[in-house]
Image (spheres, rainbow, N blue to C red):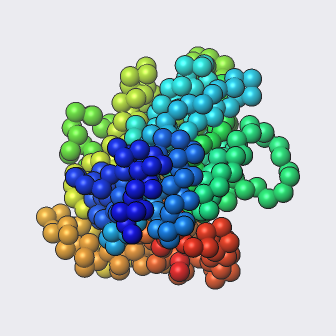
């Protein structure tokens, strides 16, 4: 049975693109190396038509499949389970920029395009594609859409959902829905695009997308500010919104211990101002007029913030290299944390106004529960998204820490999130890692509607089964 099915896949995509032997860890193991599954095969189609042929074969045989982009996900949503029954549908060969329409400010691309390549193609056309995140050198736009990725510029441009005007999707039956128009207004029934964005491959396989572009800013400036507290960081955010308006494109907060890990594992990055202050903030101002105008606005903001006491010290990058260096520090926090050892990750969102109280209370609860626990707190304060991660006490057994404390820590953190009217997943998704937790923190009505959509669009449950939607 399996051999007959595999031969059908080989006929659809070519024998060289159906992998069953050798080291398949690049597709079977998640990015955090927390789990590894076993695939029946890794299948690498090279076109939308080939994707459709593979899905039809799976639908007819009842074989489950896991769509996968750059395999940079953090919630075990893009790797197979251990059954050996699932195929991995790798979309990385679908990697073409299909076209750029400068007048319409749109770009149409294959789902397997690496995010950084989209950014570069837009820049070469004199335009901006603003989605930016740490994994941009390897993550793909299809994966970004499937998880509704956020990143560092959500404050100005929104999540990936807000950047998408249309999709091309292969349904669970192997049909192709083409909705790639670059229209900003189209009220002809349900917005099917929004069903698939954020669905993590459980309702359909995204194969192409039409994305929004923007004019390149005349100048982009970056500042690094030390603040005495999270309350001060929130106050600084309000001042930045007032002084910079739509020019405020980034506002990242980083706790002292998070930056200490970067300093420890990447000392060459020279982290500024972190030793004396509990938090630092990274701000970005993108100006449509000139660098002089942008710098003047930044200086006025920081002068006001220093006078108000919400900033203790600050530096403004003098050139692009310095700005990139500051952003590199921020983006190195997850890597430094990985170097420190296994940890318990949380990707939470909260009303911005409630973040200081949430952190103070939850920090205290965790310290009481696990004396010596280390908190790696950083993230996109401008849109209320924190990466509130928990590291074992120094010198402890990391694997034992996860084994003994992960469930308890997750429950404590998520119960607090619920109490503060937040979400247990801001931008990473649910995948297989959090699907068991979802019914505890999402209403029965919402879960019921999700299950109804899944059953309607994927009645055989072949698309990424067991992920996102509780069974």
Q: Quadrant of residue 447?
A: bottom right
Image coords of residue 159 (percent x, y): 60, 48
How many numbered marks have been drawn onto this rendered protein structure?
0
Left or right: residue 151 compared with residue 351:
left
- Locate residue 370, reporting x and y percent: 27, 76
Q: Please, is residue 232 above or below residue 411 in the view?
A: above
| Residue found 55% across the figure and 19% down from its top | 124
Q: Residue at x 43, y 22 (%)?
A: 320
Front in this rendered view, residue 190 or 455: 455
Is residue 430 among the parts visible in the rendering? no
Give residue 186's position: percent from left, percent from top.
83, 46
In this view of the protein, which residue sits in the foreground, 70 or 460?
A: 460
The answer to whether any part of residue 211 appears in the image is yes
Residue in view at x 34 percent, y 39 percent: 329
The x and y percentages for residue 362 are 42, 71
| Residue drawn at point x = 40 percent, y = 29 percent | 324
Q: Residue furthest right?
A: 188
Viewed as shown, does residue 408 lie left or right of 193? left
User: Could you say which is closer to the camera, residue 212 or residue 394?
Assistant: 212
Q: Is residue 335 left or right of residue 87?
A: left
Between 283 and 181, the one nearer to me in the picture = 181
Q: Name the image quarter holding the N terminus.
A: bottom left
Tell me if residue 219 comes above or below residue 89 in the rendering.
above
């Amino acid at each position: 049975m399996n051999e007959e099915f595999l031969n059908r896949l080989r006929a659809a995509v070519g024998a060289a693109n159906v992998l069953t032997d050798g080291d398949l860890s690049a597709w079977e193991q998640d990015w955090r190396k927390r789990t590894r599954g076993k695939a029946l095969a890794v299948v690498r189609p090279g076109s939308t038509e080939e994707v459709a042929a593979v899905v039809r074969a799976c639908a007819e045989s009842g074989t489950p499949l896991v769509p996968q982009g750059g395999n940079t996900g953090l919630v075990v949503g893009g790797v197979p389970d251990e059954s050996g029954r699932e195929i991995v549908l790798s979309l990385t060969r679908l990697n073409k920029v299909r076209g750029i329409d400068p007048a319409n400010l749109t770009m149409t691309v294959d789902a397997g395009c690496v995010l950084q390549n989209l950014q570069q193609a837009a820049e070469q056309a004199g335009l901006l594609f603003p989605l930016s995140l740490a994994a941009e050198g390897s993550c793909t736009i299809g994966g970004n859409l499937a998880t509704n990725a956020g990143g560092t510029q959500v404050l100005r441009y929104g999540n990936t959902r807000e950047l998408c005007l249309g999709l091309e999707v292969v349904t669970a039956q192997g049909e192709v829905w083409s909705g790639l128009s670059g229209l900003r207004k189209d009220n002809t029934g349900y917005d099917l695009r929004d069903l698939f964005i954020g669905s993590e491959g459980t309702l359909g396989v995204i194969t192409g997308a039409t994305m929004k572009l923007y004019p390149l800013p005349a100048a982009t400036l970056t500042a690094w500010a030390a603040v005495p507290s999270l309350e001060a960081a929130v106050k600084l955010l309000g001042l930045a919104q007032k002084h910079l308006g739509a020019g405020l494109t980034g506002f990242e907060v980083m706790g002292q211990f998070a930056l200490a890990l970067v300093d420890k594992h990447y000392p060459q990055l020279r982290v500024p101002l972190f030793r004396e202050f509990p938090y630092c903030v990274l701000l970005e101002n993108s100006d449509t007029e000139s660098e002089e105008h942008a710098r003047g606005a930044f200086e006025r903001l920081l002068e006001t913030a220093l006078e108000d006491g919400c900033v203790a010290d600050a530096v403004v990058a003098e050139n692009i290299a310095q700005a990139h260096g500051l952003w590199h520090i921020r983006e190195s926090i997850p890597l430094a944390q990985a170097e420190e050892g296994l940890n318990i990750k949380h990707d939470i969102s909260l009303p911005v106004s409630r973040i200081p109280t949430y952190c103070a209370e939850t920090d205290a609860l965790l310290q009481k529960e696990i004396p010596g626990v280390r908190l790696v707190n950083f993230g996109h304060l401008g849109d209320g998204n924190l990466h509130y991660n928990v590291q074992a006490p120094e010198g402890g057994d990391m694997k034992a820490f996860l084994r003994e404390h992960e469930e308890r820590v997750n429950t404590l953190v998520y119960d607090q999130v619920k109490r503060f009217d937040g979400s247990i997943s801001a931008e990473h998704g649910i995948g297989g890692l959090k699907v068991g937790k979802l019914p505890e923190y999402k209403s029965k009505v919402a879960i019921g509607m999700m299950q109804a959509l899944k059953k309607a669009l994927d009645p055989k449950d072949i698309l990424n089964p067991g992920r996102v939607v509780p069974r």
